[in-house]
Amino acid sequence: ARSGAAAMTHTGLVTVNSGGTHSKTSATGNWTFTVGWTIASGGTTSCTAAATNIVGGAGAETHDTSGTLQLNGTSGNNIVLGATTRIGTLRLQTACTVNLQYVTINGAATNNSALDHRGTSITITNLDNLTLNSNGTSALGCNTSAVLLTVTSSSITGSGAAGYLNKD
């Protein structure tokens, strides 16, 4: 388990294996991933520290989620992925469990979508009060029709070929 209260910086890909946890619980400092993360089935990554900036390296990192991802900010204090350098993409893979509330995702032009839904059998607790921004293909990518996504009280903007929504 890796947990931190202050600023944390990770160089290289962070992999959270089955049974592992990785969390940030204090709003002090940024959470930096220079390459991105992979949350394996059974692993958990969470951030419940409102106003945390999750920042990347060169803007092409991919955050793959097959385990549990919980990012919960508060009203007016979103958790921001890609605060200073836009992230590549946040991918929701098969069998993941996702709880995103009061989260901003600023996607880069180098990858597909800010939030990219790729899997089947996804368990959604919340996709609520999200701000999805993309300079790439789209702000929200749905690469399977097997799962219905319900996004509530959110703002979705994009400037790529598909703009707001891309469906394969």
Image (tube, rainbow, N blue to C red):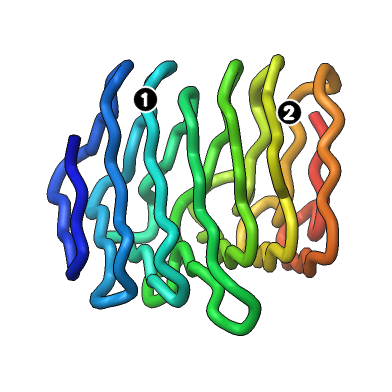
The one of 167 and 63 positioned closer to us in this rendering = 63
Residue corresponding to mark 1: 43
State left or right for residue 24 relative to residue 41.
left
47 or 88: which is nearer to us? 47
Residue beneath the point at 61% across and 84% down: 76
Q: Secondary structure at mark 2?
A: loop
Q: Is residue 44 above or below residue 9?
A: above
> Is residue 156 found left or right of 25 in the rendered image?
right
Q: Quadrant of the C terminus?
A: top right
Which residue corresponds to the image point at 30% horizontal and 48% vertical from the top-left? 23
Give the mark, 1 or 2, whose residue is nearer the N terminus: 1
Which x, y percent locates residue 14? Answer: 23, 37
Find numbered disc 1 in the image and state the secondary structure of the residue it sits on.
loop
Q: Nearer the viewer, residue 27 or 84?
A: 27
Q: Amino acid at mark 2?
A: Asn
Reply above or below: 55 against 1.
below
